Image (cartoon, rainbow, N blue to C red):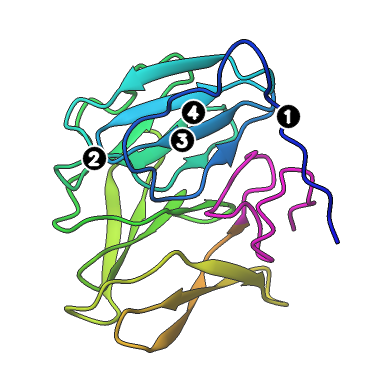
Amino acid sequence: SPIFRERWTGAPPPPYVGTAVSAGPAIDRSGNVWTASRDGVLTATSPSAQAIAFHLPSGRGGALVILADGSLVTDDAADHLLRVSPDGRLLWSSPPDLGAAPGAPLVLAGGEADLVVPTADGRVVGLRAADGAALWSWPLDPGSSLREPTTAPLPTGATVGYFPSASGKLFAVTLDGHLDGRAPWPKAFHDPANTGDAATPLP
């Protein structure tokens, strides 16, 4: 059986990262563990348990992804997606309002959309990372919440995205481009195998 040992002992105490962290963390290239809490606290915790916290302007944070430049994307209580620099600055002057709560996006490279986002009203939306502009939107399962997607490469160089829905259906969507291997955390749970391990190679 595995042997568990607490890594953070003594001082400082385990970091406080907000109320009700309901989505998995993301890990950047420096080993910082990023979390977003339901009360809008975005926290970077170092491997030595030093924590730096930022507050999202509208509260509530969900699942995180980390782009190639180290910036993060999460959602807020107003159903916007936010792109945040590692020092807590908002990078999109007009955060996209997707009309329903967004889920964790896929970070893609080589296609039109840099971010592909599932929504709580059953749509998939493609966004441009530079400014958050919505490039397209497609209804997959209207009225049902889409969950965090995963991906698999196709022989054509495109990618298939698998989107599970709260209705019990699974949707396969062909996407231009591929999961961005330059990004340290390009999807929920890091990689297509959902290992949650930053050391797992990306396709």
- Ranked by sequence position, the earlier of labels 4 and 2 is 4
Which residue is identified by label 1? 7
- Ranked by sequence position, the earlier of labels 1 and 2 is 1
**Disc 1 marks which amino acid?**
Arg
Which residue is identified by label 3? 35
- Ranked by sequence position, the earlier of labels 1 and 4 is 1
Q: Which residues are magenta?
A: 179-203
Residue 15 lies in the magenta stretch: no
- Foreground label between 1 and 3: 1
Which residue is identified by label 4? 71
Residue 203 located left or right of residue 85: right
- Position of residue 42 relative to residue 176, above or below, is above
Quadrant where the image shows the N terminus:
bottom right
Residue at the location (28% across, 55% down)? 102
Crowd rating for badge 4 (residues with CA inside 10 Å; few <14, some 14–19, many 20+): some
Q: Are marks 1 and 2 in contact (CB under 8 Å)?
A: no
